[in-house]
Amino acid sequence: MSDAPIIAQKAPYPVEVTEGKTYFWCACGKSQKQPFCDGSHKGTGLNPVKYTAPADKKVFFCGCKASDKSPLCDGSHSKL
């Protein structure tokens, strides 16, 4: 078991979200449906992060898995 996430990509994932809809962001980096969870985290010690969209808009989900504002990007990828 490993609790260190894998970097899925060193850039955020721009996603148009729908107000009130819930999304589950992949925190482990193993999902084949990035930036969202597909269950690949099982056995990693990491769990997906629930995000409920506050409005219809474009948001940027973290791709490097190092954001302090997860599930959203905070620019941490620029320091990797």
Image (cartoon, grey):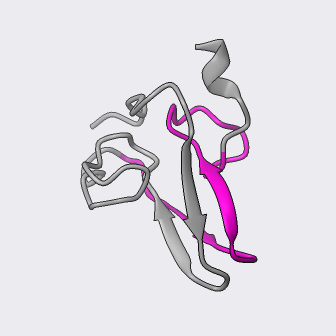
61 or 37: nearer the viewer: 61
Q: Is residue 68 above or below residue 48?
A: above
Residue 1: % across, % down = 27, 37
Residue 51: % across, % down = 61, 68
2 or 6: nearer the viewer: 6
Would residue 66 be counted in the magenta stretch? yes
Give left or right: position of 55 versus 18: right
- Residue range highlighted in magenta: 45-72
Would residue 23 be counted in the magenta stretch? no
What residue is at 42 percent from the left and 28 percent from the top?
7
What residue is at 25 percent from the left and 49 percent from the top?
32
Q: Is residue 41 above or below residue 29?
A: below
Residue 55: % across, % down = 74, 77
Q: Is residue 8 above or below residue 80?
A: below
Give left or right: position of 42 versus 77: left
What residue is at 63 percent from the left and 49 percent from the top?
60
